[in-house]
Image (spheres, rainbow, N blue to C red):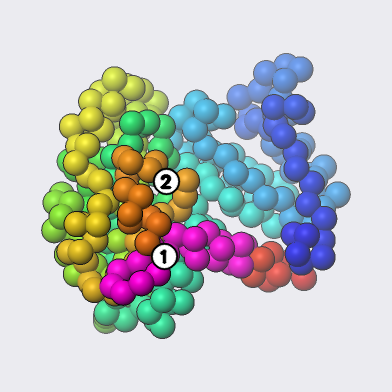
Amino acid sequence: MTQLGGHAHFLDPTKIYTPAREGKEIAYTTERVSDVARVLSRMGTAIAIRCYGDPVEWEYGGAHALLKEFARWSDIPILNMEDDIYHPFQGLADIFTVKEKFGGFKDVNFTMSWAYSPSVHKPRAVPQSAILYASMMGMNVTLAHPKGMELDPEIIAQCQEYAGTSDVGSFKISHDFEASAKDAHVFYPKAWCPEVFFKPPVGEDDLQKSQEIFDQHKDWKCTSEIMEMADKNAIYLHCLPADRGFEVTNDVIDKTSGKGWTSAVFDEAENRLHVQKAVMTLLMK
């Protein structure tokens, strides 16, 4: 916002009245979203919100519902900086990076894979937006994960629909980590939590079971040997921060130059700045 010549104000919900949906209020602690949205609409040109996990008690879709409630009452644009279903800006950064590296999307093999982390507190938003955007742009998309780590069925259905209406792309699901890396132009291994981690009705609110699923698949790690299975000019992506030593080894994430495959994570991180400025420019003229 500063680079565009404007002013950004950070509102820390732990130090003010926390915005809450109807029925979620706590006296002297929260303020209903309908009120917050209308007040801020009088004071700014857009509202950027990032919310998932603990603030909505890991109720899957709770954060997205909160953002939709803001959009319902706000007279100015709501910018989704990540909720528990979608991460639009990260998805745009991913797609921008692919175009930057390969010139386009036709015949690009894009693999979004789960990877091991000691922490199960990992939202689904990044992988879901990644496969949505890659499918939308007509890439050959592979979603790879161990059984028990399935993503939102509505997201999967949307990806299949995009692939079905595309003359060039495809979408498939694999439960084989190494096979999913083979011939990939883009390899994007990242942890996300299983459905059982979320509170009912979507999940079981079972932290122990979630950890057990994670710990059964410690071999889902991106190493240089795995990257050698990908296309010779493949790129490694990660939204960052990466859990080094678990999701990925140092020799992969730090290989930003040289012959063969490379890590594009820092280009990807920079590109999120650019796509966010692009969206703000479009919405806040």
Residue 273 image-quadrant placement: bottom right
- Residue 179's spot in the image, x, y percent? 13, 58
Residue 162 image-quadrant placement: bottom left
Q: Which mark is residue 174?
A: none
Asked whether 191 or 83 is in front, the reply is 191
- Residue 27's spot in the image, x, y percent? 73, 16
Disc 2 crowd rating (10 Å Cα; few below 14, some 14-19, many 20+) is some
Is residue 225 shown above or below 67?
below
Judged by its main secondary structure, the magenta piece is helix
Question: How far is the residue under mark 2 from the one under mark 1?
Answer: 15 Å
Q: Which quarter of the rendering shows the C terminus?
A: bottom right
Quickly name the residue at label 1.
256
Quickly name the residue at label 2.
242
Q: Is residue 159 left or right of residue 82?
A: left
Work out whether residue 92 can be spotted.
no
Q: Is residue 175 left or right of residue 6?
A: left
Q: Which residues are magenta?
A: 257-276
Q: Looking at this rendering, what residue extends furthest in the top direction?
A: 27
How many labels, in total?
2
Label 2: which secondary element:
loop
Residue 267 highlighted magenta (yes or no) = yes
Label 1: which secondary element:
loop
Residue 180 image-quadrant placement: bottom left
Q: Indicate the amino acid at tag 2.
A: Ala
Is residue 169 shown above or below 246?
below
